Amino acid sequence: MPQKVALKVVHVSGQDESYKASELNHHSPLTKGWQSTRFCLYPQDIVVQLEKRCRLRKIQILSHQFLVATKIEFYVGDVPDDTAVSLQNARYTRLGYVSLSDNEKTGFKARELKSVHVDAVGVFLKLVIHKNHINKYNLYNQVGIVAVNVIGDPLDKPRTFSDTDLYNEGEELLSDRLLEGSYSRPDYINPLDDLAFDMYQDPEVGQIIKKLDRKKQEAVLQERYDYAKRLKEAIAGLQKVGEKLGKMEIEKRQAVENEDYDKAKLKKVQMDEYRLQAYQELQINALLESRHPKPVDFDSPRQPTPPRLMELPGQSPPSQHNTPRTPYDDRPLPALKNKDSLKDISPPPPKPPPEERKISAPVPAAPVVESEPEPEVVAHPEPDTDDESTADPGGGPTEPEPMSEKDLRDASSAIDVFGKPLVSKAYSKVWSFREDALLALYKELKEYPASTPKEDAKAAFRAAIFLIKRAIDDKVFAVYKAALKLERMLLTEYVGVHKIPRHDVMYAVEKTLVNLLHKSSDMALRNREAAKDFILEISKYKEVKPTHVVPVECVKPFKLNTGPRLALSRTEIVEHLYEEHGLQDSLTVDSIMRFSVQALQHNSGEVREASERIIKKLYKEVGAPIKDYLPPDDEKTRKNTLYRMLFEYFDKVDGKPSKSDFKKSKAEIEAKKQAEIEELQIQLQKLKDMASGKAPINEDMLKEDKKKKEKTVLGGKLSRVTLFKVKRVLKETNKRVPPTSQVKQKASKPSAVVDDDTSTIFNIDNSESSENTCIFCGERNDGFTEEGLDVHYWKSCPMLKRCANCKQVVEIAGYTDHLLQECDAKKNFVRDPRCSEAVPKSEYDQHVADKSCNATKPNTNHCPLCHENIPAGEEGWKVHLMEKDGCKQNPRRLLALNKPVQGKSGAAGATKPKGRSGIPKPSALGKGKSGGR
């Protein structure tokens, strides 16, 4: 188990003579800490050596209140095996750094404690302190560190110091951790090892607390739970005593520095008396099980009395009763600093019966102290936060303790209405008194006659809300439950009977709602659920619902650093409010979405999921306006899993295929096309073999091809681009299709009969595979070799164009689909549903607003160049892009029309196609809608 590791400063780059680095070797309220020299150079270095080679788990730095560094870096140093442990042999590894606040917000009065969790092995720790924050108090640009604390797991090889006397103070702290290791989790860090404990606790009291903590762990292992419980209570009480003694020690030291020795002597006397009184009241000797005149059975199941308010020695309560006092025992204090056991302190004489005692706030008086009737009586704690038991603790007081001056001022309005006895019970430290006060108030207000004057009824209502607000924060569930019961009666019955105005009802709900929302983040599940259920319940009360206070307060966005439990409770409350009340004046789309969008950014997954549920339910009811509160629906946003799931849900609600479904469908289409291409290649190979005589013409295969004509790629499923790709594949593998004449010669053999449809298939293959013909525009040219065709496609084919974005050559008929699906710049375009063209996203809003585009019509193609509607089918595209009266925005059309006509002699030149000469019949390629390319 990690534990506090003793350390010693072995190197420092500079130090003020009054604030030396050796101050960092010890921790106590009087520690002054280290300060750099005036106007020093930065950075400053401090190296501390650990008592043992450790696996460091936690490093703590307590900074000076106004000599604050901007940044501190941490390095851990280790020494290789078989090497002497010395500063010169250390090898350092950088762990990281922490930045410190300039402390301006606290007025340079608070010290900043930085705790860093690390995992590194070493025997040296090096701090690199960077330049200081500038402020009016830091006149010499210094930096200061008050304390350094290291917590880690000692390893097998101990590294001890030469001056071991330095660790006398911490010897007991570092010894015998075996018990703690078996008692706690392996990664558990004892709060008593924290730097804050040593810096604000009186050293003597701190050692006693650590002894009691060991005793408590032993008691748990031995299953002595009553004893462990008393030890726990004593530790809590001693911590308060130690902090108070630490403050008094500082005041005594300041008096000595000011040479006010009378004040210093008085402080010393007060400290000694207060210390001894604390030891007596908490029965430290008995708890430590040291010598005691009367053994105490701490394992008995009896219920002890509640704790008294310990008074500062030298002060007496302003009681109206002259209670007899006994002189204080002035024997010397236990010599804890020499690690001796506590000396026996015999019990003082018994004091008068409890009914004669009065305990009040302390005021200055002679140094006397109240004596105890029995030194063995141990304070009874309040029940655990989850304990609903209302049994009266045996031996407890019959009356609540007097209220402090501050509580009397705060509760003055409630005292005026209900009287001091009842309010004193509500403020008591005993939970049963607090519960009794609320139940008595419930009975009293429920029996208020309807004839009660209106002003009196209002005053009682407001005073009761004041006590309810305080009781909602109570840690005891029985008190908390009684507070909810009282408020329920007030809002459902009392308000209607006594005609309480609406503004008073709003006041009551607003005052308690804040506490209820905070309670909804309680660690105890039933406290959280009770708070959430009650908030939803009061939102439906007929006197509360018209005020809209509950939904307005609950729907306010919370900060991103809000705790996960509170954020989740708030989100679930808003979700239930929307489900139960729907959209209304206080629960609008705007208010709910602002809350939900903020909750979507929270670091807790449960909070994000609850917010996502709200948005989905709201989208089902409202629809598209919800998207206005979310980031734009694009590829970048959909990379975020949360937004992708939301937008896919929106698409599902709208009846649209999701992006994932679209990608899956696209992949299936591509796979199907690939299969068709492979099938076409196989068929072409078979036809080639039949034409060359390598295989006989198979009549069954021809008939089968005829049946599949409408289903295969030769039946029109593939576009000309696909056929062109197949042709290119065949050319690369030198699989040329034979001329038509050869096929016809083969077909004339009696072994097979080739009908017209079969001839058409061979003609298709022959025409599409011709070396000198463009498969797109049908132009024939002797210069159309493989390279010549590439130049033709690139520069002059009237059916093609170069994309202005990616520079690829694409068919004009499929240019729109290319921009939306294939182009490198496809993310910059969106389809306009009116004209079906691809419009740049930057111009889309204006394009839609103008409505000046030419809308598409059924059974037509839409030209992306001139934006006109043209006849459907491939023939419509050829006429529009190649004929004399065709597309005015196609510059290649005029170039093709102006080419010279090649004569019959086959001289070089272009042959202008007439009609559909040299290209396949539409029946062969298929008549599909090509406007959607």
Image: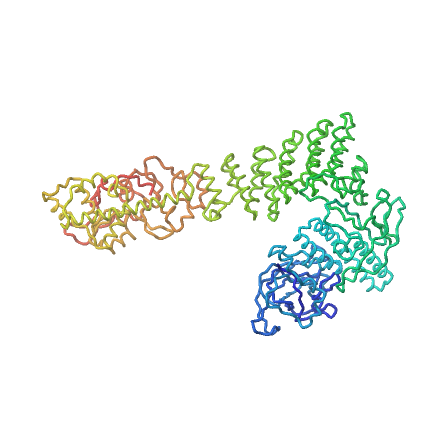
Residue 686: image x %, image y %? Answer: 19, 48
Instruction: Evaluate whether residue 141 shows in this view.
Output: no
Residue 675: image x %, image y %? Answer: 29, 46
For the C terminus, the image quarter is: top left
Residue 97 image-quadrant placement: bottom right
Residue 451: image x %, image y %? Answer: 78, 25
Residue 737: image x %, image y %? Answer: 19, 50
Q: Nearer the viewer, residue 234 or 724?
A: 234
Q: Nearer the viewer, residue 398 or 108?
A: 398
Q: Nearer the viewer, residue 409 or 337?
A: 337
Q: Nearer the viewer, residue 292 or 547?
A: 292
In this view, which residue lies farthest toward the top? 451
**In the image: residue 461, left or right of residue 827:** right
Q: Please report the residue visible at 36 percent of the width from the left and 44 percent of the height from the top.
A: 666
Instruction: Evaluate whether residue 670 shows in this view.
Output: yes
Compared with 78, 665 (above or below) is: above
Compared with 907, 32 (above or below) is: below
